[in-house]
Amino acid sequence: MDEKILNNAEETTVSEAEANNTEKAKLPDPPLNDENILDVRHLKKYFPASKNFFGKPLSFLKAVDDVSFTIKRGQTLGIVGESGCG
């Protein structure tokens, strides 16, 4: 099946294989260097798991406990969490 693509006000017909080819759309990787844009050490994040009658936390859920990382210019960090975790 051929598809028509409008490019700069000109209509071009391409095959389905060409239309699905994403190799041409990839951007080159940015050059990496030693410049740190983020440096995190010993990150901790706890959430109250249960509270007493007065609202004082009785126990905690450790979402992140003692995590360290560095991100250099051109790098990407992905954080994956449980559904609904915010």
Image (cartoon, grey):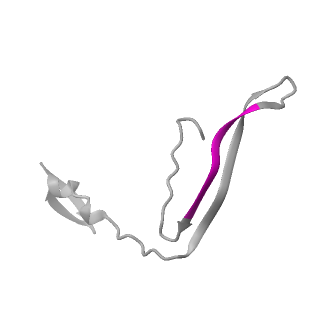
* Vertical arrangement, residue 19 with respect to residue 50, above or below: below
Q: Could you say which is closer to the camera, residue 11 or residue 86?
A: 86
Q: Could you say which is closer to the camera, residue 41 or residue 83?
A: 41
58 lies left or right of 10: right
The residue positioned 53% from the left and 35% from the top of the image is: 83
The residue positioned 84% from the left and 31% from the top of the image is: 56
Q: Main secondary structure of the magenta part?
A: strand
Residue 82 location in percent, x, y? 53, 37
* Vertical arrangement, residue 84 with respect to residue 53, above or below: below
The residue positioned 82% from the left and 25% from the top of the image is: 52
Q: Is residue 29 magenta?
A: no
* Vertical arrangement, residue 10 with respect to residue 65, above or below: below
Quarter of the image with the C terminus is: top right
Q: Is residue 63 magenta?
A: yes
The residue positioned 42% from the left and 72% from the top of the image is: 30
Where, by quadrant of the figure, is residue 57 drawn? top right
Residue segment shown in magenta: 59-70
